[in-house]
Image (tube, rainbow, N blue to C red):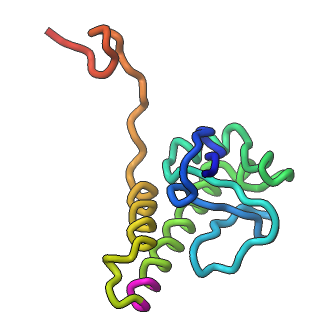
Amino acid sequence: MRTCVGCRATRPQGELLRYGLAAGSVAPAIGARPQLAGRSAYLCPRRACRDRAIKRRAFNRAFSTSLALVSGGPTAADALWTATADLLRREIQLLDRSAENPHANLRRRGLERLLFELSSPPAPSDHRSSANGQGGRPTHG
């Protein structure tokens, strides 16, 4: 079990993305990529968690350093998101080439789930109306 640095939810390690430090910046640590030295930070594969982690400077705290990711703004965050998706795709392709039955591979399914969540468009704001007393969509009528 690991804790997301964005939303602080505790989830199984396989449901979170792992990040480490490489050359003074945050880098995804996925699959066959060489292990990144030092500490790691885990993040849910949702843009809201990524944005919250950057806003709260959670990566800075996790790695006890000042990182360009925060000062780089949305462009740096989007570049990190794109690099993570690319590594997930490469790892899935590697599993496809090396496995006899790639669809039965649990790791592949887990990576596909992460990639799907990562590639999903951001959810609309989560403001819920209490017009009907139960939250969710307001009742009109």
Quarter of the image for residue 55 reads top right
Q: Nearer the viewer, residue 27 or 7?
A: 7
Near-viewer residue (120 or 78): 120
Nearest the eye: 34 or 131: 34
Residue 130 x/y as whole percent: 35, 11
Seen in the picture, residue 65 relative to 110 is either above or below; the reply is above
50 to 99, vertically: above or below: above
Task: Answer with left or right where residue 38 lies relative to residue 72.
Answer: right
Mostly what secondary structure, the magenta segment? helix
Where on the picture, by quarter, is residue 122? top left
Identity of the residue drawn at 74% across and 42% down: 57
Which residue is drawn at the image coordinates 40% and 61% (left, top)?
113
Q: Residue at x 59, y 81 (%)?
A: 32
Q: Position of residue 108 (x, y in %)?
A: 41, 73
Magenta stretch bounds = 94-98
Q: Please give left or right for residue 9 compared with residue 114 in the image.
A: right
Identified at 42% across, 31% down, the residue is 125
Q: Quadrant of the C terminus?
A: top left
How far from the left and from the top, in percent, is residue 123? 40, 40
Above or below: residue 139 compared with residue 49: above
- Tell me where residue 92 appears, x and y as whole percent: 43, 77
Position of 78 compared to 96: left or right?
right
